[in-house]
Amino acid sequence: MLTTLALAPIAAHAGPWAAGFGWVFLLIPLFWIALFALFFAFVGRRFRRGGFGPGYGGGWHNPAREAEATLAGRYAGGDIDEKEYAARLAVLRANNSHDPSSRR
């Protein structure tokens, strides 16, 4: 009985761990891991889209190639004939002669 009385103050100050709530401490690192994961997901998405201004984010968007693809689609669909396709393609490539990536 004296042992029980001697250990009662220690058990009273042991807090939630004495009652079996020690797992609550796992929530703290899980919270921080989730917070960092969300942060890097949003930052990574901005880098993949090239959202930090001109010149950053790679060369995925090439207007000259998109224009040539649109023109080729119109030719393939029968909207324009071969002569008009060749003329418009020459104009597109002449207007974009300063871009070395548009040359083949």
Image: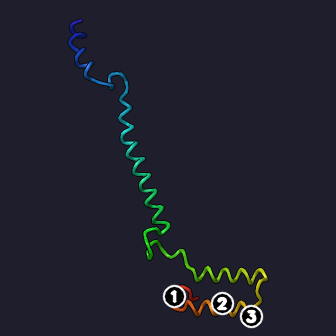
Few, some or many C-alpha atoms within 10 Å of disc 2 (few <14, some 14-19, many ≥20)?
some
Q: Measuring from the top left, give residue 81's x and y in whole percent.
A: 77, 89
The residue that disc 1 covers is 99
Three-letter amino acid code of the residue under disc 2? Leu
Foreground residue among 25 and 75 = 75
- The residue at 73%/81% (across/down) is 74
Q: Measuring from the top left, give residue 36's x and y in whole percent.
A: 39, 51
Three-letter amino acid code of the residue under disc 3? Lys
Foreground residue among 80 and 99 = 80
User: Relative to residue 2, is residue 43 depicted above or below?
Assistant: below
The residue that disc 3 covers is 83
* Mark 2 to mark 1 CA distance (whole Å): 15 Å
* Mark 1 to mark 3 CA distance (whole Å): 25 Å
Name which of mark 3 and mark 2 comes first in the sequence.
3
In the image, taking residue 59 as reference, residue 81 lies left or right, namely: right
Residue lying farthest right? Answer: 78
Name the element at disc 3: helix
Please report contact status of discs 1 and 3: CB closer than 8 Å, yes or no.
no
